[in-house]
Image (spheres, grey):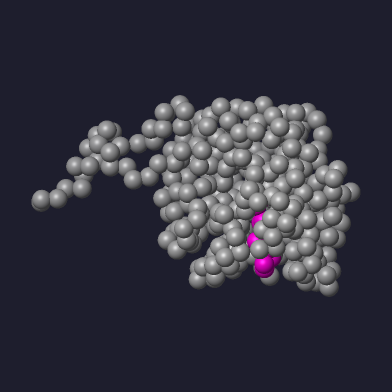
Amino acid sequence: MLIRTRRNRQSKAVRALNRETYLMPEQLVYPLFLMDGKGIKSEVPSLPGNYRWSLDLLLPEIESCLELGLKSFILFPAVEAKYKDKTGTHGYASDNYYLKVASEIKKRFPEACLISDVALDPYNIDGHDGVVRNGKIVNDETLDILAKMAVAQAEAGFDILGPSDMMDGRIRKIREALDDSDFKDVGIMAYTAKYASAFYGPFRDALDSAPVEGKDIPKDKKTYQMDPANKKEALREAMLDYNEGADFMMVKPALNYLDVIHLMEENFDIPIAAYHVSGECAMLIAACRNGWLDFDKAMPETLLSIHRAGAQIILTYFAKKYAEMWRERQGDFG
Ligand code: PBG
């Protein structure tokens, strides 16, 4: 045998030389659920270790993340029922606490990168990402609302906006609205290939944002989110978002869609992000709680796999845990 691949695995130091992929805490984005009020840190039952935070308790949490080198956060609001209506007007209302919280965080930690959520579902009584009329999600009427939300979020100080709605034409609409309002430096991380997945459950529990049951309300999001059977269609979505001015393109979920992440990474020259969604994290937590898997090993392996597939950026509920582990082990996961 002239060639022995095991030679490059013989010691920790040699394995480190042979390692192809590293994932740094600053490549992660930490999703945070917000609630209006004070003194709130309420655990999401289906996503243990994750909380709905009020601003006062969230600030020290963000500070501790920044100290760990975790710099980016994506914020999602839990919205009280009284603020929900057919067209999600509270999404851009001046008294929307979500916008105020973002401004406060930016004031306190200007170095943090804040990513928003642009979609109607937290504000919509029907629990859909777009306006529902006669049993259908109306695309173009929704675009006008998304554009208003986007400008309000840029005014609040978000660095990057995250349209998660999957309406057609929204990246261009949002880009134009931002430029017209002179927010030329505010970026867009498009949810480009967002699938109609069964893995969003804990997230919808956290925000109480699942599609509402009722006559003339579609019971799922399949007319706008993608069919899990499709891959070529992801390229079509990506071509559109790229040409409409997206700065980052996301695949969501992550683990069941590693092929899609890889495909996007090979075909586009802007950073590809993957959303390691709530249900994917919940599965791992559950197995570890049962003693079936070792969290300290399975979690970093999972994130590394998503990164290796081609995601430069990973949005994950494990971001802080990973950053803590990174510090403890000084980046040594070999
Ligand atoms: C909705 C939105 C969802 C998630 C992020 N934004 C859920 C959905 O589409 O119903 C899911 C994220 C997660 O599960 O962690 N605009």
Exactly how many numbered labels are in the figure?
A: 0
Query: Quarter-wise, where is residue 242 in the image?
Result: bottom right
Q: What's the magenta region?
A: 161-171
Instruction: Check if residue 44 falls in the magenta segment.
Output: no
In the image, what residue occupies the spot 40% across and 41% down? 22
In the image, what residue occupies the spot 79% across and 59% down? 145
Q: Residue furthest right?
A: 82
In the image, what residue occupies the spot 46% across and 58% down? 269
Left or right of 315: which side holds 174? right
In the image, what residue occupies the spot 65% across and 31% down? 109
Q: Nearer the viewer, residue 202 or 252?
A: 252
Left or right of 116: which side holds 307? left
Instruction: Check if residue 168 falls in the magenta segment.
Output: yes
Left or right of 188: which side holds 215? right
Q: Main secondary structure of the magenta part?
A: loop
Asked if residue 252 shows in the view, the reply is no
Q: Position of residue 30 (x, y in %)?
A: 60, 40
Q: Position of residue 126 (x, y in %)?
A: 81, 60
Asked if residue 231 shows in the view, the reply is yes
Is residue 292 shown above or below 256?
A: above
The quadrant of the picture occupied by the C terminus is: top left
